[in-house]
Image (tube, rainbow, N blue to C red):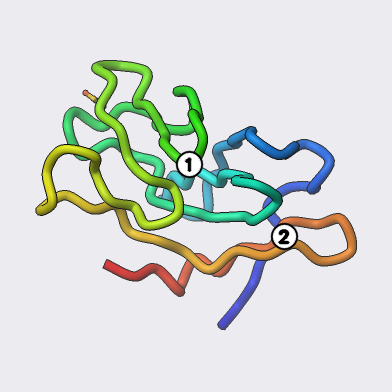
Amino acid sequence: MAFLKVAVLEHLAQGAMIGVEVGENRIAICNVGGQLHAIDGSCPHRNGPLAEGALHGSMVVCPWHAWEFDCTTGQNDRNPDIRQRQYAVKAEAGVILLDADSRQD
Ligand code: FES
């Protein structure tokens, strides 16, 4: 596990989402009820930037064609065969730390 500092927590209020890039990975980090979750930030439809979309509860809405994914599981809301990869993410001392090697398919 190699956690990297990717953002400061004060930039990610409850109910908000930010996008970060770690290497070639585009990642969306969501604050759902004070819990942080991170999923692959590239939409599997046409590669839309998920973190630039909306966060409704735990649901990330792609800004391009409105596909939706649960940020807590990566699961698409309509197709059970589509699920975004998840990453280990945590907050410590006001800093958001993400392990880009931890992604789970
Ligand atoms: S690119 Fe995300 S819904 Fe089309």
Is 81 located above or below residue 19 in the figure?
Answer: below
Q: Which mark is first along the chain, 2 or 1?
A: 2
Q: Give the spatial CA distance, label 1 vs label 2.
A: 23 Å
Q: Is residue 91 left or right of residue 18?
A: right
Ligand 1: give its quadrant.
Answer: top left
x, y (%) of residue 97? 69, 63
- Identify the residue under disc 2: 5
Residue type, mark 2 in image: Lys
- Tell me the quarter of the picture where residue 69 sits: top left
Q: Which mark is residue 49?
A: none
Q: For the point 65% across and 47% down, which residue is it?
A: 33
Residue type, mark 1 in image: Ser
Q: Is residue 20 left or right of residue 4?
A: left
Q: For the point 49% across and 43% down, which residue is it?
A: 28
Q: Is residue 64 left or right of residue 41?
A: left
Q: Please give the count of numbered marks on the rendered protein.
A: 2
Does the CB distance between marks 1 and 2 fall below 8 Å?
Answer: no
Crowding near pointer 1: few (<14 within 10 Å), some, many (20+)? many
Q: Is label 1 in a helix, a strand or a loop? A: loop
x, y (%) of residue 68? 30, 33
x, y (%) of residue 9? 79, 47
Is 102 located above or below residue 74 in the figure?
Answer: below
Q: For the point 10% across and 53% down, which residue is it?
A: 81
Q: For the point 59% across and 35% down, which residue is it?
A: 17
Of labels 1 and 2, the one closer to you: 1
Q: Is residue 23 left or right of residue 82?
A: right
- Identify the residue under disc 1: 58
